[in-house]
Structures are given as C-alpha cells and as structure tokens.
Image (tube, rainbow, N blue to C red):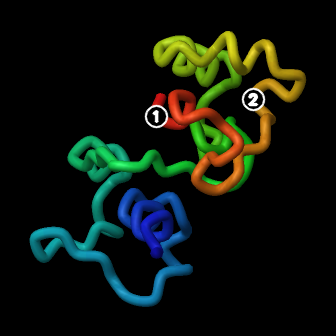
C-alpha cells in the first residue's frame, strides 16, 4: 500500500509542494538535488512491476521531456515498439494502475 506514491515522491515525479514534509537521503533534502543527479543515483527493481494509471506514454515520460520518436526508441530497446505500433491508440494506450490490462511479460519490460 502506497508503493506508487512513495516511488513517485522519491523520484520527484510529483510536485514537491504536494508533499507534506521533506524526504531525506543521508540527511540531504532530495528537493535540493538536481533531478539528473537524484535520479542517476537511484534505482528500483520491483518484485512486481510498478505502472501508473494513465497512458503508456505517461508511464514512459511523465514530464513530457522526450518526443514520441524518443519514446518509441525506448520501447524498441525493450522489444515493445511493435506492440505499441500495432495498437490503434499507440503511445496513448491507457494503462490501468499496476498495468493489469497488459500481459505479465509486457508489464516487466
């Protein structure tokens, strides 16, 4: 319970003003670190893949920093590009929270 919220807060995927309190790592407020620095030092290997409710594109690029082409390149690297290209909604395919509308293999990739 709350795993998605914790990951979103830790990786600063949500607006910091929406969080009551401060997240500290080794007594350092993560809000004072650049996103590049913070995220380059964090990794998560979930036992069960974590997906957020929304579009596939949102799950790949929640802050819309990359073009559709760059997102498709990332999908190609994990062998999901064909799935997306074959779906009528493409990158706008809706993903349920936890990705229950995707196969287990698709969720892990």
Q: Residue furthest left?
A: 26
Q: CA distance from mark 1 to mark 2?
A: 17 Å
Above or below, comparing residue 18 to residue 97 in the picture: below
User: Crowdedness of circle 2 by 10 Å Cα count: few (<14), some, many (20+)?
Assistant: many
Seen from this angle, which residue lies furthest front?
A: 104
Q: Residue at x 45, y 46 (%)?
A: 49
23 vs 108, nearest the viewer: 108
- Looking at the image, which is closer to me, 84 or 21? 84
Question: Residue 108 has which mark?
Answer: 1
Q: Residue at x 53, y 79 (%)?
A: 17
Q: In the picture, residue 55 is in which quadrant?
A: top right
Residue name at image x 62 percent, y 46 percent: 99
Q: Decide if residue 27 is on the left or right side of residue 94.
A: left
Residue 28 shown left or right of residue 63 in the figure: left
Q: Position of residue 97 (x, y in %)?
A: 64, 56
Number of numbered discs visible in the structure rendering: 2
Which quadrant of the figure has residue 93?
A: top right
88 with respect to 31 (left or right): right
Q: Observer-nearest residue: 93 or 47?
A: 47
Q: Which residue is mark 2?
A: 91
Of residues 30 and 6, which is closer to you in this image?
6
Judging from the image, what secondary structure is the residue with disc 1 in? Answer: helix
Q: Is residue 22 above or below residue 62?
A: below
Residue 56 at what x, y percent from top left? Answer: 68, 37
Task: Name which of mark 1 and mark 2 comes first in the sequence.
Answer: 2
Residue drawn at (17%, 71%) of the image = 28
Disc 1 packing (10 Å; few <14; some 14–19; many ≥20): some
Q: Please give left or right for residue 88 compared with residue 41 in the image.
A: right
Q: Residue furthest bottom?
A: 20
């Amino acid at each position: 319970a709350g795993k998605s919220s914790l990951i979103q807060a830790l990786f600063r995927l949500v607006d910091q003003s929406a969080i009551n309190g401060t997240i500290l790592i080794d007594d350092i407020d993560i809000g004072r670190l650049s996103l590049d620095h913070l995220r380059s030092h964090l990794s998560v290997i979930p036992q069960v893949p974590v997906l957020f409710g929304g579009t596939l594109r949102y799950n790949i690029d929640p802050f819309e920093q990359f073009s559709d082409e760059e997102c498709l390149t990332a999908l190609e690297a994990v062998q999901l590009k064909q799935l997306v290209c074959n779906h009528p909604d493409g990158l706008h395919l809706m993903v349920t929270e936890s990705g229950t509308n995707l196969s287990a293999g698709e969720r892990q990739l």
